[in-house]
Image (tube, rainbow, N blue to C red):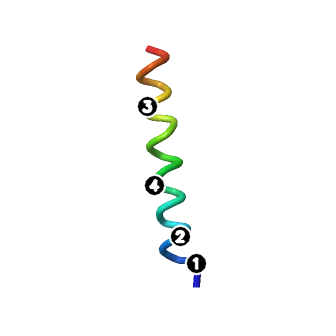
Amino acid sequence: MEGPKLRISLHAYDFIPRRQQDTLN
């Protein structure tokens, strides 16, 4: 199963845009 992998991917995806927004601001 790719449960943990998907969870990590989602977490990273949520973290990337947050950092980008902080840099954009």
Alpha carbon distance from label 4 to label 1: 14 Å
Work out which residue is located at the far right of the displayed protein and give it.
1
Q: Is residue 14 above or below residue 18?
A: below
- Look at label 3 and name its amino acid: Arg
Q: Earlier in the sequence, mark 1 or mark 3?
A: 1
* Residue in the picture at 51% in, 35% down: 17
Q: Which residue is mark 1?
A: 2
Q: Which residue is mark 3?
A: 19
Q: Which residue is mark 4?
A: 11
* Residue in the picture at 54% in, 59% down: 9
Q: Is residue 13 left or right of residue 15?
A: right
Alpha carbon distance from label 2 to label 3: 21 Å
On residue 5, the disc is 2
- Look at label 1 and name its amino acid: Glu
The quadrant in which the C terminus is found is top left
Alpha carbon distance from label 3 to label 4: 13 Å
Alpha carbon distance from label 4 to label 2: 10 Å
- Look at label 4 and name its amino acid: His
* Classed neighbour count for the residue bearing mark 4: other residues with Cα under 10 Å, few (<14), some (14–19), many (≥20): few
Q: Earlier in the sequence, mark 3 or mark 4?
A: 4
* Residue in the picture at 55% in, 67% down: 6
Residue 8 appears at what percent x and percent y?
47, 62
